Amino acid sequence: MTEKRTGLIWQTIKRSVSQSRASRVSHLAFAILAALTIFWQTANAADLPVVVFGGAGSGFGRTPPTRPDFGELFASPSKWPIGLAATKVFELDNAYVDHAPLADVRRIVEFLNRHHITIALHAAGVKVGADGCGRGIESYHWSPQGNAGTLRRLKALGANVEYLAFDEPMTFGNQTIQVPLAEGGHQKACRYSPEEIAIMDAEVAKDSFDYYPEIKISDSEAINGALFNTAGWVSAMKQWLSAFRNHAGRPIDVVMLDINKNTDWHAQAVAMAKAVQASGVKVGYYINGNLLHLSSNEEWTKAAVESYKEYERIIPIKPYMIEVSAWNRLPSRFLPETSPDTVTYVLMQYVKDHATP
């Protein structure tokens, strides 16, 4: 039994014992049953990949929070015990850390530290061009200091930041021509070379080394068979991975595939996974239900569960890391994991499907 599981089981029992005297016995029995359930689900899942839970969908600082129960993740651990026990890394949005009340960020950091969960900081890595290209597009940032201010805030709070998680710099900085804007019209992307993007990303990464010298760098990139030529996309990524290693002095640790299931993705995902692995970099992928035709929470969670099963059939490389995350309007809530219409339900189901009795 790992230290994390032992601590979680003990905390569950201790919380119940502290209930009123009249209900103490029933609470304790329930706590023991819940703790044993957590242990069964996680004790035999030693070969799970690194499990990341994405909280970036809180949307604070850029849009109104898309899931109003975001704060309950940290106030009500009993609502997601199985997923919580399996989670090793929690991804936080840099905009949330920058703009949320300090007390809220502190509460999250203290919760994650108690549960031995590290942080992946969602980060932009591409500069807006001198002609304004990229302004308002995902992955572009305004400040020449990148994410240094965010990391400084987390460091002061005692946060254990394990990853700087780049948000698709090659997808939007190199492959994308233009993107539609919410207010109408389109914004031109910059179409930088892999070398140029590697230099920008290395600059952002080096800023993070000042606060967390041992920080790892992860990257996410889109798989989109409709928009990107597979051979050219794979070649560009190989160039970028090599150039980043040269400029940053350390490699990208893992590339997370953001698979657009609305397109013909199979061949491109396989080719990219093989190329990333051949470059000496680990491979992972996101698990979500982001299909265009979905209209309910339940449809999203069903699609998300089906997606990881399909990835495991199609992609011939076992993922080093998976991230359960939702950044669109569905589903509308995180909790509880026992309800089949929540984000944590998908996380719990993944753990159950990969635990051996």
Image (cartoon, rainbow, N blue to C red):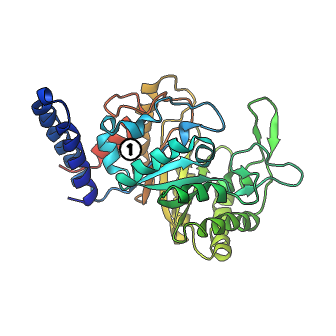
Q: What residue is pinned by disc 1?
A: 309
**Direction top: furthest residue:** 295
- Provide the secondary structure element on which disc 1 rests: helix
Looking at the image, which residue sits at the far right?
A: 131
Q: Which of 259/69 is in front? A: 69
Decide which of 48, 6 is in the foreground and name it. Answer: 6
Could one spot residue 229 in this view of the protein?
A: no
Looking at the picture, tell me which residue is in the foreground, 116 or 261: 116
Residue 221 position, x and y percent, is 60, 53
The quadrant the N terminus occupies is bottom left
Percent x, y of residue 240: 67, 66
Residue at x 14% of width, y 27% of height: 23
Query: At which x and y percent is residue 335?
Result: 39, 32
Q: Quadrant of residue 242?
A: bottom right
- Above or below, comparing residue 154 to residue 36 in the picture: below
In depth, the one of 92 and 165 nearer the eye is 92
